[in-house]
Image (cartoon, grey):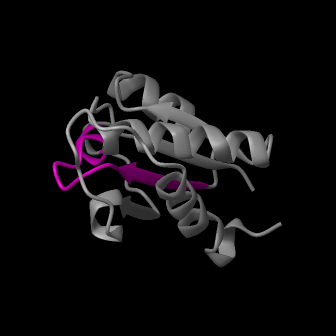
């Protein structure tokens, strides 16, 4: 199963966190995930996501930038994860912590549909 990960485009710690979590998943399960950044156009997102069986949006905070971009493409995610709702504090330009990345990765991988 190919899973599309759409991450937010923020430059805050939570925005960077979503990108780093997606990159870790790409490394851990090559070919299982594809990754799109919300900076891409809605048309490009739509074209690339069509090859995936599942779409997971990973937003850094409740501004939900990635979700808003995805909705512009008329696609609906199968799952929506918001880092700040998992207890991760939005800290401006603070550094992303490894345990925060792992928290996001575990949430995505622990879903039954993401198992091999």
Horizontal side of residue 76 vs 49, given as left or right: left
Quarter of the picture holding the N terminus: bottom right
Callout count = 0
Horizontal side of residue 93 vs 53, given as left or right: left
Horizontal side of residue 76 vs 91, given as left or right: right
Of residue 41 and residue 21, the one placed in the foreground of this image is 21
The image quadrant that residue 33 belongs to is top right
User: How far across and down, in percent of the image, does residue 59 sit?
Assistant: 33, 50
Residue placed at 57% from the left, 63% from the top?
108
The image quadrant that residue 77 belongs to is bottom left
Of residue 27 and residue 69, the one placed in the foreground of this image is 27
The image quadrant that residue 26 belongs to is top right
Can residue 51 be seen here? no
Residue that sits furthest to the bottom in the current view: 112
User: How far across and down, in percent of the image, does residue 32 sit?
Assistant: 75, 48
Residue placed at 79% from the left, 41% from the top?
31
Residue placed at 22% from the left, 45% from the top?
91
Q: Is 21 drawn above or below residue 95 in the view shown?
A: below
Q: Is 88 drawn above or below residue 24 in the view shown?
A: below
The verdict on residue 63 being magenta is yes
Q: Is 83 drawn above or below residue 13 in the view shown?
A: below
Can residue 78 be seen here? yes
The verdict on residue 110 being magenta is no
Residue placed at 41% from the left, 51% from the top?
58
User: How far across and down, in percent of the image, does residue 72 sit?
Assistant: 25, 37
User: How far across and down, in percent of the image, does residue 16 sit?
Assistant: 39, 36
What segment carries the magenta color? 54-70
Quarter of the picture holding the C terminus: bottom right
């Amino acid at each position: 199963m190919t899973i599309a990960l759409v991450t937010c485009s923020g430059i805050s710690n939570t925005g960077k966190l979503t990108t780093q979590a997606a990159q870790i998943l790409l490394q851990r399960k090559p070919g299982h995930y594809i990754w799109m950044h919300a900076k891409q156009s809605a048309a490009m997102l739509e074209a690339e996501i069509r090859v995936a069986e599942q779409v997971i949006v990973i937003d850094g905070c409740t501004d939900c930038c990635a979700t808003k971009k995805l909705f512009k493409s008329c696609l609906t995610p199968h799952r929506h994860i918001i880092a700040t709702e998992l207890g991760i504090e939005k800290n401006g330009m603070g550094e992303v912590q490894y345990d925060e990345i792992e928290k996001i990765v575990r949430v995505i991988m622990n879903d039954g549909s993401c198992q091999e």
